[in-house]
């Protein structure tokens, strides 16, 4: 796989629930480290904005220069298991968003 950078960030959302604005915090992963098997990867988001309890945010994943060997993020399309979460994707670099409230992406969060 050609080495590319995968960036994971936290963004604010607009009134419709779509990601908006600059990254509040972000971290990266060199995709050459990905084995190809379904595996959990840890990505440190580093210092950023303090998040507010009971406020909705978006976890945004983007990969630079990806036209082949794209990294896929596993999601549950049968029933959303994260209350208040939903699957949102963009195929035009975030100009427009497609939402599916019946599904959500898999993630874990670790923090203070």
Image (cartoon, rainbow, N blue to C red):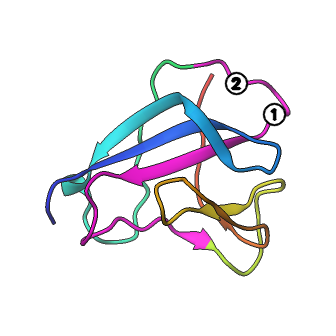
Where does the N terminus fall, quadrant-wise? Answer: bottom left
Q: Which residue is depicted at the point 76% across and 58% down?
A: 82
| Apparent side of residue 69 relative to residue 47 in the rendered image (left or right) | left
Q: Which residue is depicted at the point 41% across and 40% down?
A: 43
Magenta span: 49-75
Where does the C terminus fall, quadrant-wise? Answer: top right
Q: Distance between the residues labelled 2 and 1?
A: 8 Å
**CB of mark 2 within 8 Å of CB of mark 1?**
yes
Compare residues 31 and 12 and report the one nearer the observer.
12
Does residue 15 belong to the magenta stretch? no
Q: Where is residue 15 in the image (x, y as percent from the top left)?
A: 82, 43
Q: Where is residue 49 in the image (x, y as percent from the top left)?
A: 60, 19
Q: Which residue is depicted at the point 59% across and 69% down?
A: 75
Q: Quadrant of residue 111?
A: top right
Q: Say whether residue 12 is visible.
A: yes
Residue at disc 2, secondary structure:
loop
- Is residue 56 shown above or below 85? above
Q: Position of residue 97 (x, y in %)?
A: 63, 60
Q: Quadrant of residue 67?
A: bottom left
Report the number of numbered marks.
2
Compare residues 40 and 30 and report the one nearer the observer.
30
Residue at label 1? Answer: 55
User: Crowding near pointer 1: few (<14 within 10 Å), some, many (20+)?
Assistant: few
Q: Say whether residue 44 is visible.
A: no
Residue at label 2? Answer: 51
């Amino acid at each position: 796989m050609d080495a590319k950078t995968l960036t994971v960030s936290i963004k604010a959302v607009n009134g419709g629930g779509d990601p908006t604005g600059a990254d509040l915090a972000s971290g990266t992963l060199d995709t050459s480290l990905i084995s190809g098997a379904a595996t959990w990867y840890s990505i440190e988001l580093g210092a950023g904005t303090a998040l507010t309890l009971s406020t909705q945010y978006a976890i945004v994943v983007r990969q630079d220069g990806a036209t082949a060997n794209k990294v896929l993020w596993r999601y549950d399309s049968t029933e959303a298991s994260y209350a208040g979460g939903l699957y949102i994707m963009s195929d035009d670099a975030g100009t427009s968003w497609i939402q599916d409230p019946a599904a959500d992406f898999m993630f874990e969060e670790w923090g203070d």
